[in-house]
Image (cartoon, rainbow, N blue to C red):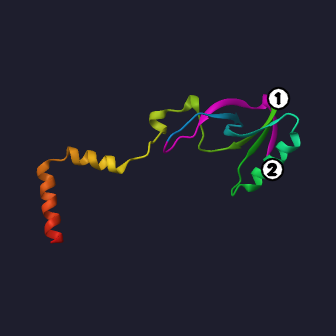
C-alpha cells in the first residue's frame, strides 16, 4: 500500500471492458498503472482509512497494489486492476464483447437456411431414431 497526495496522481475515467455491460468508473493513473476507486473517508478519518486499506490488502488472494490518496477533503482508497482501460483509449467496438444469446443465434440460423435443407435434416434424424 502506498500513501500519496493528489498532486502525485492523474485522475481519469476508466472502463473495464469484457463481456456484458460496462460503465465509466472513477479512476486514476499512477506509475503507468490504472486504479479504480474503492472507498472514501473524511479528511479527519486518517487512521480509519489506513486500517481499511490494510484490511483490503490483506484480504486479497494475490498481490494487488492499493493506494491511499490524500485529497483536499478526503482520503480515498484505490485498487490496481489490469483490466481497466482509460476512457480516452477505449474503443467500444474493439474492446466490448456483448454476451451471445445462443437461442437467438439459432433462430437466425434457422431463418436463413433453406427449407429443403431443414427437411433433409429432419428425415435423417427420423431414420436414425426410428
* Image quadrant assignment for residue 8: top right
Residue labelled with disc 1: 73
Which quadrant of the figure contains the C terminus? bottom left
Q: How many marks?
A: 2
Return the residue found at the far bottom.
130
Residue at 81 percent across and 30 percent down: it is 71
Residue at 68 percent across and 44 percent down: it is 80
- As for residue 10 lying within the magenta part, the answer is yes
Specify the label residue 86 is tagged with.
none
Judging from the image, what secondary structure is the residue with disc 1 in? loop
Q: Is residue 125 left or right of residue 6?
A: left
Image x and y of residue 62, in percent: 69, 56
Vertical side of 52 occupied by 10: above or below:
above
Judging from the image, what secondary structure is the residue with disc 2 in? helix
Highlighted magenta segment, given as a residue range: 1-20
Residue at 27 percent across and 47 percent down: it is 107
Q: CA distance from mark 1 to mark 2?
A: 21 Å
Residue at 11 percent across and 51 percent down: it is 116
Disc nearer the start of the sequence (1/2): 2
Sort mark 1 into few (<14), some (14-19) or many (20+) by Cα contacts within 10 Å. few
Image x and y of residue 45, in percent: 87, 39
Vertical side of 129 occupied by 106: above or below:
above
Vertical side of 77 occupied by 88: above or below:
above
Residue labelled with disc 2: 54
Q: Is residue 24 left or right of residue 110?
A: right
Nearest to the observer: residue 83 or residue 75: 75
Nearest to the observer: residue 46 or residue 130: 130
* Image quadrant assignment for residue 129: bottom left
Image x and y of residue 111, in percent: 22, 45
- As for residue 97 lying within the magenta part, the answer is no
Amino acid at each position: 500500500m502506498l500513501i500519496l497526495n493528489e498532486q502525485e496522481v492523474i485522475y481519469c475515467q476508466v472502463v473495464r471492458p469484457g463481456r456484458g455491460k460496462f460503465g465509466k468508473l472513477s479512476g486514476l493513473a499512477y506509475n503507468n498503472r490504472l486504479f479504480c476507486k474503492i472507498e472514501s473517508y473524511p479528511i479527519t478519518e486518517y487512521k480509519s482509512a489506513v486500517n481499511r486499506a490494510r484490511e483490503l490488502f490483506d484480504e486479497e488472494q494475490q498481490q494487488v497494489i492499493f493506494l491511499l490518496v490524500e485529497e483536499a477533503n478526503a482520503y480515498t482508497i484505490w485498487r490496481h486492476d489490469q483490466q481497466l482501460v482509460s476512457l480516452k483509449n477505449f474503443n467500444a467496438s474493439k474492446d466490448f464483447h456483448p454476451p451471445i444469446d445462443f437461442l437467438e443465434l439459432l433462430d437466425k440460423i434457422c431463418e436463413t437456411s433453406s427449407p429443403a435443407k431443414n427437411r433433409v435434416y429432419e428425415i435423417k434424424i427420423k431414420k436414425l431414431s426410428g
